[in-house]
Image (tube, helix red, strand yellow):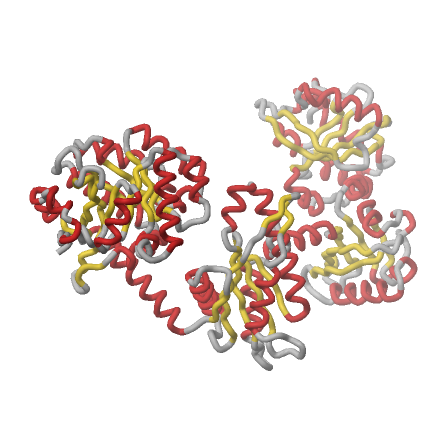
Amino acid sequence: MTQLQDRATAGSRAATGGHAAESDDFRTLFVTHPTPMWVYDPQTLKFLTVNDAAVTLYGYSREQYGRMTVLDIRPDSERERMRTAVRSLSDLGRPERWQHVKANGELMEVQTYGRKVRFDGVDAILAIVTDRTEVARAYRQASDTRSLLDSIVSSLPIGVFVKDMEDDGRYLIYNAACGEIVGLEPGGVISRTDRAIFSEAQAEQFMLQDRHAMDTAGVLVFEENVERCDRSLRTIRTLKRAIPAADGSRPRYLVGISQDITDRRDYEQRIAHIAMHDSLTGLPNRSFFSHQVTRLLTEEARPRSFALLYIDVDHFKHINDSRGHPAGDALLVEVARRLKALAGEYGMVSRLGGDEFALIFLLDEPGSRDAAALARGVMDLFSEPFDLDGATEHVDCSVGIALAPRDGDDVNVLLRNADLALYAAKGDGRSTYRFYEGAMRLQAERRHDLTVELRQALAAGQFELHFQPVLSLADDRISGFEALVRWRHPDRGLIGPAEFIPVAEETGLITALGDWVIREACRTAAKWPDDIKVAVNLSSCQFRQFGLLATVVSALDEAKLHPSRLELEITESVLLAESGQNLQILHALRDLGVRIAMDDFGTGYSSLSYLRSFPFDKIKMDRSFVSGICTDPGSIAIVRAVTGLGSGFNLTTTAEGVETVEQLTRLRSEGFSEIQGYLFARPMPGADAARFIAGFRHEQFRGEESLSLAS
């Protein structure tokens, strides 16, 4: 037996008054106990004795422990803290977290419990060490020796109690953690019953649980609200079990472990709320919303009749881009507040994501409104301006409506149909509402089928370019061609872009299709005379891909086409969305030598400001103004305004949709630079464009009264 083991034996005898049996029990318990423990001198900090578990866990031999102090198992950063804790006794009676060093130099996180003891006739400190994740193991390893059991139990951070059920359930053990849970000192609980401590109702509840636990083999778990002495309620989780009698008779003692889980339950409730609610607006999210819709649809007594409104904030992205995301968030919060006030007691509002909201509104309650009136009410909410951090903004919304159970008896079907109605409302120009109709689903299916066919068409090379000539009025020559994409469908023949370009933009296929158009247009134009340009329309969606500039550079290089012979036509939507990034790309293209034209000029609401923000090379006046040039004074005024802008900004001006000699004559007299339209020629395949160039005669064009080139 080593010196430390001898001292453990002697110390146990001194601590137990020399009773050999108890000494042996203490020595056996201490030395063989699986929880690492030691006793040290608070004056010298030397180890007086350590148990086998400490030797195994730390890797130091007993001889090494005999030469060490408790500072030696700590890193330098923890030693002064340990000295302070010993001097102030701050580590006694409550758990402390430390870093300890194993014999191999490995650091480990531990939690220790300290308690004063008498050892070998002197005051000492018993230290019990547990891994922070295995505190529960200490409870199962409590010693049968009362002095050590008291040290361990009183130090545990979880409530532990033992009752004598043959003595009216009097408490034999009630540790400090238990006292903290109910606001009582352990000394005031020991030897008393529940009736003497708690309210009558609470005592009856505890005693009922105890009887159940005593009659059950195994552990019972109870969770309840317990009133503390200060009348506050705490949520307590208690495990109770009858301690089996050694002789197999009916158990006498009941052991319980209690834990205050109030904060945990509050946290779980907050997490559940977060999981089911939008963090910005506090509204129910899509998951909770779907749950509520399902509940309304499946009520056994009577499925409810309700309207599901799908609400989208129109042009919300513009607010984010112009005012910044904080302003966008403020707008969403205010929208949520207004919708919640509108819903009242008959509805529930949810934020489904982004700028999309949903509203359930019961239709079968007294005082509830019909769906159309409700939709108008939603739109009226947006008639009042929004105050966004001191800036006033006017915002509209679009609404899609599905009625349950008429339009679906499943939450996913209802949401899909309301979304289809919203899509139709946006297609009608936004700022309106639409009810779901069966035809909308068929249109959606057709869009889906068209999307599938578009992918196949791209892979199969079914697209082709047609070219419409652009005529220069200054020298009566062909100045260029506009490239227009067509789809040669194997069953439906030639399909114009108006039918498939919107779908390509929605699905992202416009990027691949647009790249092909640029490359094909450059390859074709490279075969024409050097003074003839080719114009290609760009979608705003293509600017979302950073590869646009690389595509143009590659296409020009592959075709060996000079950049000045390529014109890229954009509409206001390119500058309206992501204007900073898009302007950067446009400047890079223009620096490359590519010409930039604004198409459909005059149809938007901010064209003039865009002429100042970017140095365009050309503006193309929309055909709607050309059609009335000979009869409508307003159209004539616009034509003259465009001519003035062209002169002031040094821009080429092009008129689209010229179909009559009278229109051509008027445009020439007003000083337009170029014309394009059916009067001159219809779009034609690339081969026909080459023949058109070869057969073009200036004289033919100057005879305007007998012009028949389009035939």
Q: Position of residue 134 (x, y in %)?
A: 65, 42
Q: Residue at x 58, y 75 (%)?
A: 370
Would residue 683 be visible to someone looking at this image? no
Q: Quadrant of the N terminus?
A: top right
**At 68% from the left edge and 45% from the top edge, which residue is drawn?**
136
To which quarter of the image does residue 302 belong? bottom right
Q: Quadrant of the C terminus?
A: bottom left
Q: Is residue 27 left or right of residue 513?
A: right
Q: On screen, 681 above or below 46? A: below
Q: Is residue 21 above or below residue 430?
A: above
Residue 63 lies left or right of residue 208; in this view the side is: left
Decide which of 661, 563 is in the foreground and name it. Answer: 661
- Residue 671's image quarter? top left
Judge by depth and name the residue closer to the eye, 3 or 156.
Answer: 156
Percent position of residue 587, x then y: 37, 31
Report the number of discs.
0
Residue 308 visible to the viewer:
yes
Question: On the rendered structure, is 468 left or right of 348?
Answer: left
Horizontal side of residue 58 vs 88, given as left or right: left
Residue 601 in the image, given as x and y percentages of width and height: 37, 46
